[in-house]
Structures are given as structure tokens and as C-alpha cells.
Image: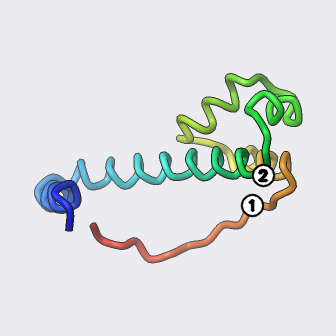
Amino acid sequence: MSDLQAYIRKRKQSDPDFAVDYETGYQQFRIGVMLKLAREDAGLTQEEVAKKLNTKKSAISRIENHAEDIRLSTLEKYARAFGKTLKLELQETPEV
């Protein structure tokens, strides 16, 4: 276990607010990274995706960098912009 993982685990145990905020922030970060990687794998720029979605490049940047409160319909449109479908899955939350 890394020092960072040990710190996060200890902090979660001692600070319930940190635990909730950490999980929420981590999930939002992961969504943004997944969207960016999918766009890059499709060989598209943010500007090209923006044109497909009839929006601005800055909106795509916000989606990829600040994925909080993103609508499911927006995620579906984003995926369709490069020929993908959105798949949602519920999983057990692993403890860190």
C-alpha cells in the first residue's frame, strides 16, 4: 500500500466528511478522464466533438475537466458523437 493510499484510508476513518467528499470527487474525476480518453481514442479534438454536439469547445472542456452534475442525456450525446454507446453499471464500492 502506498503512502497516499494509507493516508486516504486513515483520513476516511477519522473524518466522515472527507470520506464522502473524496468518493464524490474521485468519481467525478474518473468520469472526466474516461470521456477524454474515449474522445482521444476516437481521434477527435474537443472542437470536433463540440461541433457534433452543437456546442462550444469550452463546454466540452468543462465536461472533461469538471464532470460534476453532468446530465445523463449529455453523457449519451457525448458518447454518440464518436460512435459509442453509454453503459451504466452499479458495482460494490471498494474500500481504500
Left or right of 61 in this view: 21: left
Please state which amino acid type lies under the numbered disc 1. Leu
Image location of residue 59, percent across then percent down: 69, 27
Residue in view at x 80 percent, y 30 percent: 50
Q: Residue at the spot x=40%, y=46% of the render?
A: 25
Which residue is disc 2 drawn over? Answer: 79
Residue marked by disc 1: 86
Identify the disc placed on residue 41: none
Q: CA distance from mark 1 to mark 2?
A: 6 Å
Question: Neighbour class for label 1 at 10 Å: few (<14), some, many (≥20)?
Answer: few
> Dot 2 surroundings within 10 Å: few (below 14), some, or many (20 or more)?
some
**CB under 8 Å between callouts 1 and 2?**
yes
Q: Position of residue 68 (x, y in %)?
A: 53, 41
From the viewer's side, name the closer residue of 41 and 52. 41
Amino acid at circle 2: Ala
Which residue lies at the image location 20% right of the left edge and 58% below the top edge?
Answer: 12
Q: Position of residue 87 (x, y in %)?
A: 71, 66
Nearest the eye: 38 or 28: 38
Mark 1 lies on a secondary structure that is: loop
